[in-house]
Structures are given as C-alpha cells and as structure tokens.
Image (cartoon, rainbow, N blue to C red):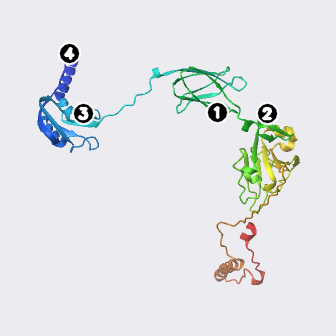
Amino acid sequence: MKHKFLLMVIFLLSIGNMVYAQKVNLDFRQEKLGKVMEAISKQTGKSFSYSRPVINPDAKVSISVKNEELYAALAQIIETDNVEIEITDKKIFLKPRQKRTPSPSTDEQKQITGHISDASGEALIGASVSLKGGAVGTTTDVDGQFSLNASVGSSLLVSYLGYVPKEVKIGKNSNIQITLQEDAQALEEVVVVGYGTQSQKLVTISISKLKMADVDQGNDFNPVKMLQGRVTGVNISSSSGTPGAEPNVIVRGVGSISGSSAPLYVVDGIPGEKYPRLNPNDIESIEVLKDASAAAIYGSRANTGVIIITTKAGKSGKTQIDFSGRTGFGVISSDITMANSSAYMNAMQVAVDNYNVQMKTNLKYYTPSSIENISWVNMISR
C-alpha cells in the first residue's frame, strides 16, 4: 500500500513538471501581446484566461527564444510582479497578484508600563487606557499601574470619570507617568439639592438639571413639558387636548396604585402640590430629584420625586432691561368632517320611514324644533 501511494505522488509530481517544462519557440519583434499568446496556444494546446484590466493584448512585446520552457517564456513578456501565472493541463491563467501588506511584527512592539494619578499624585484606580485606533486596552490597578503591548509612535488614550481625557504619544521610554486634570466645568457646577446648593462633585444623589438658557422654547409655554426627552427617568404626557392643560408627570415610574403619581413641585424653596403656572422666561433652571434622598428631604410628599424650579433673580452689575415677545396658536392638523344635527336627524328619519312602510306604522323620529346643532369637534378641541 505504501509503495502504491509513493508511486502516485511521483506520478502527480511528474505531470506537474511536464506542464511547466513544455518547450516553445518564439521570435517576435514589437508584436502585439495577443498575437504572441496565440502562437503559444498553438504550440502548447493551452488557451489563455485573463481579464483586460490585468493584461492588455494590444501591448507591444519582443521575444526571441528557442526550446524555452513555457513558464520562462511567459515571464519574459508578462510582468510577474503584478501578474500571477498559473499553468494547468489545458489552460494558462493570468491573474492579478495579491499584494500582501505586511502585518505589524511583534518584534516592533514592546511592553509599556505606566502610572496614572491626579494633580495631587493620588493614584487613579480603574482609569481606562487604550491604543488609539485599535481594540487593545486595559485599566489601572489599585496602585494606578497599567501594562500593555504597543509600538513606538502609537498613541494611548487615557480617560477617567470626572477628569479631562488625555492622549499620550509613546516614545522610547517604556515607563510612562501620566497626570490627569479634573474636569472643573463638570465638577464645579452648582445644583439645588433641596436643602441649599452644593457643588456637583459633592453630590451623591440622583439629580438632573436643565438650564432654560440651553433650551429652545419655541411656542411651548409649559416649562415642565420641556423636560420631556431631556431628563432621564421623567415621563411627561398630555392630560387633555385643552391648550395649557396641566401635563401628567411621572418620575421614575408609578409610585402608588391608588394615590397620585404627580411629583412635588418646589419653587424657590416653597413646596406645593399643584403644577406651577410660570412664565418660562422667568425660570433660571429646573432640577429633578429622583431617588430616595428626595423623601429624606421633603418627607412622604416626595415619594414620587421632586421638581425644583429656580426663578431668575437680580444680579450685581449694570442695570439691564430685556424685552421679548412670543405668540403661537394650535390647530388640528387634519380636520374631521362630520354631519351636523339636521343632516344626522334626516338620515335617521329616512330609516324610520322605511320601517313604517314595512311595519305599517306612522312613527316620527324627531321634530325640527327639537334639533340643537352642536359641533362636538369644536367642543373637544377648543
């Protein structure tokens, strides 16, 4: 069995050598490549397979060989740097050569270690470190240390909650010391917490703040509706179609089955149960307290959340008077055409008359004097 397998391998190898070892005789000067390939096909019995973007049959070539191997002859008239030649029993394939881009060698990379701290030198635990433009990343340990493999010239992206992200270029030094600066704009923002004001970095409760100066009010005169889509955990819906109607506000889901789910409203420190009707232009900011800390401050009235509204106040400096005006109107986008009272009663009377004919009765559905024409569409949308 082993001898048969060995003979088969030798036979196949000999066939491959015979395919590439075929001899050709060619003598052309400044002749079209297509005509030279026709001569090769006649001598070898093999047809060519190629595409024009790869091979230009109108290109001029010169060749003069005698008893030359087929592959060697083809290599003289075809640029093998860009074209791959494959010879089979009946065909000669000319295919574009796949250019392989060398992958980064692991020898070019080295282990990078480093330490991440804040401005005071305190280690930052859990800071994110990743290679720019890649999927390689890590985090710092309890000592603020990190380690990863990177190549010289690449960049590290370092980020930590509450700090300004930083990009660090990797040089010849394998150990990097990185210092992150606090994001003062986010941490120093003052928010209202119910018992005064505190810096954002000192607050541990769930607070969302909306500054009216950052909101395009449009023609909406309801300041609470502006929270919809801008504050997480707050769902606002219209209670009726009446313009200016009090909206339904639910903070962090329904808090009671039988009781009201409306939040507690606090305007400039004064709590109230009902929705306050205020001019949006008079409001400075709106804060929403959403967790158990709201109940700790305001008691059981705040178990469904608290909306704190801070109105504008006078500021020191030069006296300034601002005037602005806004108007708007609401219309039904698609009016519903309905029958009036007279048309409806006439249609019903026709039905009664048809009944009278069948049943031999003389019933009357209505009298014209009893008709009161009411447009119910206008009544519900006024």
At label 4, which amino acid type do we have? Answer: His
Sequence-earlier tag: 2 or 1 = 1
Task: Give the quadrant of the C terminus.
Answer: bottom right
- Left or right: 36, with 314 as reference point: left
Query: Where residue 121 sits: x, y (%)?
Result: 71, 22
Measure the C-alpha gap from mark 4 to mark 2: 85 Å
In the foreground, 16 or 380 = 16
Of the residues tagged 2 and 1, which is closer to the observer? 1
Measure the C-alpha gap from mark 2 to mark 1: 21 Å
Measure the C-alpha gap from mark 3 to mark 4: 33 Å
In the foreground, 269 or 78 = 78
At label 1, which amino acid type do we have? Answer: Pro
The residue indicated by pointer 4 is: 3
In this rendering, is residue 326 above or below 103? below
Pointers 3 and 2 in contact (CB under 8 A)?
A: no
At label 3, which amino acid type do we have? Answer: Ile
Q: Which mark is residue 202?
A: 2
In terms of secondary structure, where does tag 3 sit? Answer: strand
At label 2, which amino acid type do we have? Answer: Leu
Quarter occupied by residue 15: top left
Of the residues tagged 4 and 2, which is closer to the observer? 2
Q: Which mark is residue 224?
A: none
What's the residue at 53%, 33% (across, down)?
A: 133
Pointers 1 and 4 in contact (CB under 8 A)?
A: no
Quarter occupied by residue 64: top left
